Amino acid sequence: MKLTLGPILFYWQRQQIMDFYADMAEQPLEVIYLGETVCSKRRALSLDDWMGLARELRQASGAEVVLSGLTLIEAASELSSLRRLCENGEIKVEANDMAAVQFLSSRGVEFVGGPALNIYNAYALDELVSRGMSRWVPPVECSAHLLAALIEQARDADVSLPEIEVFAWGYLPLAYSARCFTARAENLPKDDCGFICQNYPEGIPMTTQEGQVLFTLNGIQTMSGGISNLLAEYPRMARMGIDALRLSPRAQNMNEIVQQFDEVRRGGQPPLAVDGCNGYWHGQAGMLTVEEVGLC
Amino acid sequence: MQLVCPAGSLPALKAAVRQGADAIYTGFRDDTNARHFAGLNFTDKQLESGLELIRRERRQLYIAVNTYALPDGWARWKRAVDRAADLGADALIAGDPGVLAYASKHHPKLSLHLSVQGSATNAAALRFYHEQYGIRRTVLPRVLSLNQVRQVAASSPVPVEVFAFGSLCIMAEGRCHLSSYVTGESPNLCGVCSPASAVRWSEGADGLSSRLNDVLIDRYAEGEAAGYPTLCKGRFMVHGKRFHALEEPTSLNTMDLIPQLVEIGVEAVKIEGRQRSPAYVEQVAGVWRKALDAYRANPQRFAVEDAWRRVLDTVSEGSQTTLGAYHRAWQ
């Protein structure tokens, strides 16, 4: 199974981004996604910078590089930036909005469908595969049961499957809004946010009044409070025919996470206890940790 | 500009017709419908009788098959589309590309409206659905500012419908998994958000608590008005402070924007609330009809009357309304 590094969902300083990828270039990763998927105001790197970084990383790591597109497109300027990204002519793109699907499919180039596209069944999948989607990251709320049923449905309906990449580790991107919740928490207007989210390299925890960590605020994106971790599910995912596992960047110790997954795919024992949440995978509330490791 | 009103039951449908809705939208009694709540929606007989009334009064019926189809339930979504076509619905509201493809292939005469769950916020996404499935209208998510609605409407290949009044989704519709993260049930897959089956109220020494799947959404001191625990509208802790970290309990009301929406060329305004009572539909449809008629009769002198505002306030969450994302400062 391939290991992939998802796009950085937080807003980091330019130097931090560069250092991070210099580190990641040394890791056993087959695919590295780059680019800004959350907020168009985050411009530590321009499209040209991302392209330059992509070329360097491809050279240094041998991994396939993919540029991920913005998820929530509101302004005309965001749409024209997305068009430029899709028309880069060189590097594969991950579509996170149907606008990107439109740009990419009308140019006849292959693309990756990101987790923010709503595809939940084989017929919907076929609509995009037939228009060039070669790899697909299912919505984060999809369970193993749903995925298995979709794979079976595809076989029955003679729909060809793309590579399937499961979001296997990290804070789950759950929701997108017009409102910036980081700015709101800091009492700042969105139009004058001062890029305050750069102060929070892993977002801001939002807890209940009883102290239960519920969500993570990351600008206009709301993420899970807990880190989703499907490492213990590796054997089942392999049996299902999952092609790739996405690890979503965090600010500290990302290389340890990559190594844990790499060890298991090279034959190491998956952990027996689950560290993090995995409810979605088991068809339950995403925040839950279901201890259902295959011991038999 | 058309007035599109919700009907979760036959009495609500009758109220919408009586109060001058141009179109009434509803859905079937299963998970193909994003308002799939116990006790809601129509038996076959009720739907036939509602349709008869709609035809007699020369209004339109839209059917929402607006959840995402589950792989092992595909037959239900197919059947729902077939049924909408057989009924002669004036439009099918859908967001799943698989469902749209099926409808456009098997029922080419059925008019397709892209559901707000399709989450299309820009002209390029709309071109996709227009070129592939021939959609004839789209419902815009409640995340765009008025200026952005103007831009999208000007460059869209199809006319747009916007939300006029009702519960305020603060996340882009179709792009929110908060409900399934906490309860296991989501709008996209189950047609519910913060489902009633997960709600628990308890009274204790520290006040009245509302919970969703045991997660504390809000706690109210004595005398404080308590609202339904929609999870994005609770009070949470950020940086050690307790506040409505995502949004306050409030409803969307765009009545003040009628002149701008007409000028932009918005084809229809939609009232949210198929889960609400017939009395809600009666009141909201009534004042919106009056407001749209008043604007049509005399666009230059249009002003929202206090009486209309009062009616809308009484049926609003937390008895307050907002322009939401249409007004940039809200964002």
Image (spheres, rainbow, N blue to C red):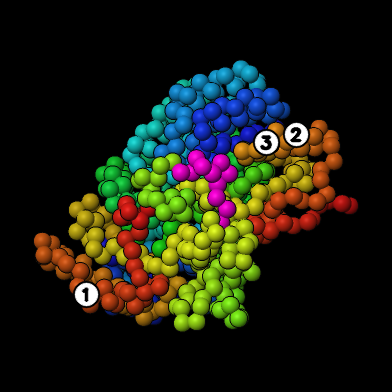
Q: Give the quadrant of the N terminus of chain B.
A: bottom left
Judging by the rendered image, the residue that carries numbered circle 2 is A259
Judging by the rendered image, the residue that carries numbered circle 1 is B306
Marks 2 and 3: CB-CB under 8 Å? no
Residue at left offset 63%, top offset 34%: A5
Earlier along the polypeptide chain: callout 2 or callout 3? 3
What range of the chain is rendered magenta? Answer: A196-206
The one of A147 and B318 positioned closer to us in this rendering: B318
Establish if B314 lies above or below B180: below
Judging by the rendered image, the residue that carries numbered circle 3 is A254
Marks 2 and 1: CB-CB under 8 Å? no
Q: Nearer the viewer, mark 2 or mark 3?
A: 3
Q: Classify 10 Å Cα crowding around label 2: few (below 14), some (14-19), many (20 and above).
A: some
Confirm whether the magenta stretch covers residue B207.
Answer: no
Left or right position of A249 against A76: right
* Disc 2 to disc 3, C-alpha distance: 9 Å
- Subunit ID for the residue under disc 3: A
* Disc 3 to disc 1, C-alpha distance: 58 Å
The kind of residue on which mark 2 rests is: Gln
Q: Position of residue A114 (x, y in %)?
A: 55, 40
Q: Classify 10 Å Cα crowding around label 1: few (below 14), some (14-19), many (20 and above).
A: few
Is residue A110 visible in the rendered image? The answer is: no
Residue at left offset 49%, top offset 36%: A36
Establish if A48 lies above or below B240: above
